[in-house]
């Protein structure tokens, strides 16, 4: 399998509960390497751009509010099949349906406040990484 990079966000519900380290343990134990990481406050514009694919969905306003409600930790994760591997350890969008041991099963509060984001394809990962990181901030 190819070495890939994926983009991750530790969302405000998780940073508020001081779960950055606990989530990073799950990531690293799954064999993914954190090759870039920073804590930022997303602006409304950044959140709207980031989730533009969902702009017609009924939950879009709530989603933008949630993503701008507190600090987030943005990350680049690297490893074999990193995009699918991270989706696997994140678990289902709704924590009620997430498999045991996944980040969302362990830590998410609800379908809206679900603790983490992970890219859904290699192409989207590249777009999302470029929205938040300069090339020299990623150290593989
Ligand atoms: P993400 O993009 O954040 O990694 O999550 P995902 O692929 O598992 O889910 P997606 O369908 O892309 O939805 C993006 C985020 O929108 C919020 N959401 N709220 N209230 C709702 O019904 C609802 N549905 C989705 C979640 O925060 C979800 O992660
Ligand atoms: Mg998604």
Image (cartoon, grey):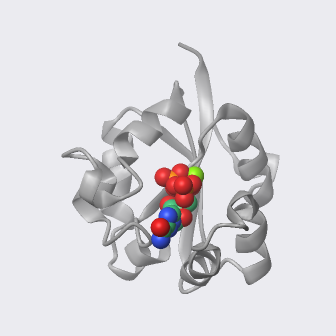
**Could you say which is closer to the camera, residue 104 or residue 110?**
110
Q: Which residue lies furthest to the top in this view?
A: 1
Quadrant (top left/top right/bottom left/bottom right) for the C terminus = top right
Relative to 57, 84 lies left or right: left
Residue 45 picture location, percent across and down: 79, 77
Query: What percent of the width, then of the height, locates residue 47?
Result: 70, 72
On the picture, is 24 further left or further right than 11? left
User: Above or below — where is 114 with respect to 7?
Assistant: below
Q: In this view, does 50 lie to the left or right of 81?
A: right
How many numbered circles are shown? Answer: 0
Give residue 115's position: percent from left, percent from top.
Answer: 41, 65
Q: Quadrant of residue 139?
A: top right
Quadrant in which residue 46 is drawn = bottom right
Above or below, comparing residue 106 to residue 122 in the picture: below
What residue is shown at x 38% (from left), y 32% (from top)?
Answer: 31
Q: Let me know if residue 71 appears in the view.
A: yes
Q: Is residue 60 above or below residue 34?
A: below
Q: Residue 10: in sight, yes or no?
A: no
Residue at figure coordinates x 74%, y 60% from the top left: 132
Q: Quadrant of residue 71?
A: bottom right
What residue is at 64 percent from the left and 78 percent from the top? 64
Q: How far across and how far down the image is residue 13, in percent?
A: 41, 77
Residue at image point 78% right, 46% down: 127
């Amino acid at each position: 399998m190819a070495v890939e990079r994926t983009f991750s966000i530790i969302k405000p519900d998780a940073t508020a509960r001081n779960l950055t380290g606990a989530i990073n343990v799950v990531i690293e134990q799954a064999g993914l390497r954190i090759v870039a990481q920073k804590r930022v406050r997303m602006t409304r514009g950044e959140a709207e751009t980031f989730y533009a694919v969902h702009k017609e969905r009924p939950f879009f306003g709530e989603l933008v509010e949630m993503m701008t409600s507190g600090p987030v930790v943005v990350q680049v994760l690297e490893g074999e099949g990193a995009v699918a591997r991270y989706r696997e350890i994140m678990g289902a969008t709704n924590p009620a349906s997430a498999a045991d041991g996944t980040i969302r099963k362990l830590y998410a509060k609800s379908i809206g406040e679900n603790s983490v984001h992970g890219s859904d394809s290699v192409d989207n990962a590249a777009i999302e990484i470029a929205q938040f990181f300069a090339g020299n901030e990623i150290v593989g």
